[in-house]
Image: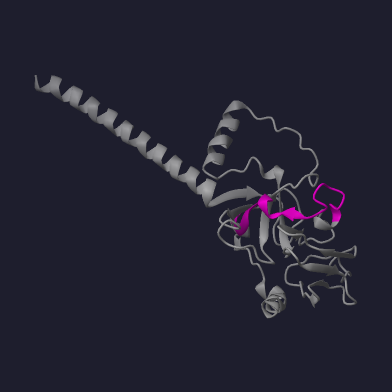
Amino acid sequence: MARSKKAPSKQRSVLLFIRDLLIIFVVALLISFLIKTFLIRSFYIPSGSMENTLQIDDRIIVNQLEPELIPISRGDVIVFKDPGGWLLPQAEIVQNPIIAGVDWLLSVVGLSAPDSNDHLIKRVIGLPGDHVVCCNALGQMSVNDVPLDESAYVLLPAGDTKVSKDDFDVTIPADSLWMMGDNRYNSKDSRYNGDTVGKGYVPIDNVVGRALVVSWPLAHWAWLDDYPDVFREVEQADQGSE
């Protein structure tokens, strides 16, 4: 009789253990989903337009509180949805059901980014109302008549000093941004999308968030700087005009 009572008791313990594991898994999945939806998520870098700041296939962590709760600043590295016409049509990726399922599960918790090819990542140069001009006699770009020293992050071909191959003179419309890649001679950014629906300007509503850190590979791990010193005089001029 004692043995017969122990068997059901042991079986019940195993079932309770499995139930608890399932509850923990579901709760962890829900928390991860909420974090991914409202706080942070992962993206990978598909092109070299942000070199040397970001390398092809780098993984980044993006803060999705910006711009909803935290205002966008000049110099921020921003992930945004294609405003229309910036990206070429992408061939559909074919995966076997197992890999597709794993990729979907990882995307739910923010560890995979199957939609990275539908997004772009650039640096914010101009905010709404800014007058952005390039280039002066020294090859510099200016924002609101303040020349910028971008040598800390801009990648230029050997022998070139102009921070943009092509000159431009724009005033950023309301609720829009002027975005440029750090790899200035190899970036299809706001300068080269003037014939699209948005005329090269990125609506703030298209911003997913600010890139905070390179998370993978470990050898590339780094916080992403917004270089406030580059834009400090512009910010001071803004405060003086208020």
Q: Quadrant of residue 69?
A: bottom right
What residue appears at the point 55 percent right and 45 percent down from the top-left corner? Answer: 111
Q: Position of residue 156 (x, y in %)?
A: 83, 65
**Residue nearest the observer in this picture, 152 or 71:** 71
Q: Is residue 6 above or below residue 38?
A: above
Q: Quadrant of residue 183?
A: bottom right
What residue appears at the point 19 percent right and 22 percent down from the top-left corner? Answer: 8
208 part of magenta stretch: yes
31 part of magenta stretch: no
**Residue nearest the observer in this picture, 103 or 108:** 108
**Residue nearest the observer in this picture, 196 or 56:** 196
* Colouring used for the render: one colour
Q: Quadrant of residue 14?
A: top left
Q: Which residues are magenta?
A: 192-217
Q: Position of residue 11 (x, y in %)?
A: 24, 25
Q: What is the count of numbered marks?
A: 0
**Residue nearest the observer in this picture, 230 or 66:** 66
In this orientation, does residue 216 appear?
Answer: no
What residue appears at the point 74 percent right and 54 percent down from the top-left corner? Answer: 202
Residue positioned most to the left: 1
In this orientation, does residue 149 appear?
Answer: yes
Q: Is residue 8 above or below residue 78?
A: above
